[in-house]
């Protein structure tokens, strides 16, 4: 493994807040929401549908938060002078950037796996072995959209502003994207607004897989478009604002 990648993973892995908010909390929400809403269903089929839907939403919520939280760390590294220190090493700036992308993607995986295990063994979600693998794989691949978004914010904003922005943005994406409650419960204008959030399409891909089908074309195209836009903007900002810059 790349030494810089291993070092960055150890740094974030020691962060208890990361473990709580992106792994443990979504798992607890999965149990709580399923038992509350699923318990009101009149039959087993209704409970199973709720359990699967909530599980996918919380997988998306945890991975989204992990990807954003891991990648905005770049603003903190700039402020602390760590990126300036890296500049005197043989490590090129492109590799520093690539490592941050890899860290964001890797750290999205634990939440997906843990919430899936909770869905299966605590809430009784029944999917085929291949479906479980595809579900985790699809949501892991889709998390790159939020890695790109996190990098964009981390590159654009200073340390304090990035921390606040990521909290607000994560909450808005979860709420408006239907990760906390079904979009069908929204007023009609807010249902339309959900279509303009990457989190909505991200969860829709997962729900398609959980229902036993391949992700529909529209969610795939929409999330790919969001990813491309976020990545292009991040690259543009990185070129204008080098990673080692302390301010400005």
Image (cartoon, rainbow, N blue to C red):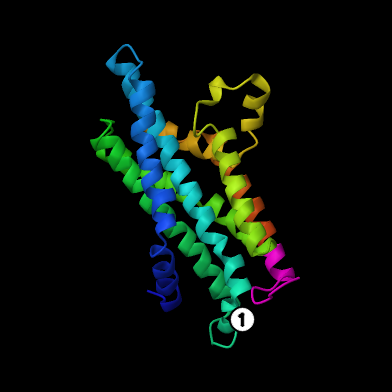
The spot of residue 83 in percent (x, y) is 59, 77
Residue 112 lies left or right of residue 163; in this view the side is: left
Residue situated in front as seen by the camera: 65 or 194: 65
Res 14 quadrant in image: bottom left
Residue situated furthest top in the rendering:
42
Q: Is residue 238 magenta?
A: yes
Magenta stretch: give its range: 235-248
Res 195 quadrant in image: top right
The answer to whether residue 49 is visible is no
**Neighbour class for label 1 at 10 Å: few (<14), some, many (≥20)?**
some
Residue situated furthest left in the rendering:
121
Query: On screen, 85 above or below 44?
Result: below
Query: On screen, 186 above or below 137?
Result: above
Q: Is residue 204 magenta?
A: no
Residue situated in front as seen by the camera: 189 or 167: 167
Tell me the residue that label 1 is attached to: 84
Res 209 quadrant in image: top left
The answer to whether residue 95 is visible is yes
Residue 219 lies left or right of residue 109; in this view the side is: right
The spot of residue 214 in percent (x, y) is 42, 35
Q: Residue at x 35, y 15 (%)?
A: 41
Residue situated in front as seen by the camera: 244 or 137: 244
Figure quadrant of the C terminus = bottom right
Q: Residue at x 40, y 31 (%)?
A: 54
Q: Residue at x 46, y 50 (%)?
A: 141
């Amino acid at each position: 493994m790349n030494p810089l990648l291993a070092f960055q993973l150890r740094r974030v892995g020691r962060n208890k807040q990361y473990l709580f908010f992106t792994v443990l909390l979504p798992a607890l929400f999965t149990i709580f929401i399923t038992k509350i809403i699923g318990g009101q269903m009149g039959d087993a089929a209704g409970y199973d549908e709720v359990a699967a839907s909530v599980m996918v939403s919380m997988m998306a919520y945890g991975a989204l938060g992990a990807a954003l939280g891991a990648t905005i760390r770049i603003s903190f590294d700039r402020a602390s002078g760590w990126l300036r220190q890296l500049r005197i090493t043989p490590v090129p700036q492109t590799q520093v950037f690539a490592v941050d992308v890899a860290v964001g993607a890797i750290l999205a995986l634990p939440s997906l796996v843990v919430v899936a295990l909770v869905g299966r063994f605590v809430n009784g979600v029944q999917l085929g072995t291949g479906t479980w693998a595809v579900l985790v794989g699809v949501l892991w691949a889709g998390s790159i959209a939020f890695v790109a978004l996190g990098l964009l914010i981390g590159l654009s904003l200073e340390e304090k502003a990035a921390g606040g922005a990521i909290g607000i943005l994560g909450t808005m994406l979860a709420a408006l994207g239907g990760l906390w409650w079904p979009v069908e419960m929204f007023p009609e204008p807010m249902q339309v607004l959900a279509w303009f959030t990457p989190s909505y399409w991200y969860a829709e891909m997962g729900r398609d897989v959980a229902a036993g089908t391949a992700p529909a074309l529209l969610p795939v195209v929409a999330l790919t478009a969001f990813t491309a836009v976020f990545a292009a903007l991040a690259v543009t900002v990185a070129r204008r604002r080098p990673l080692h810059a302390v301010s400005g």
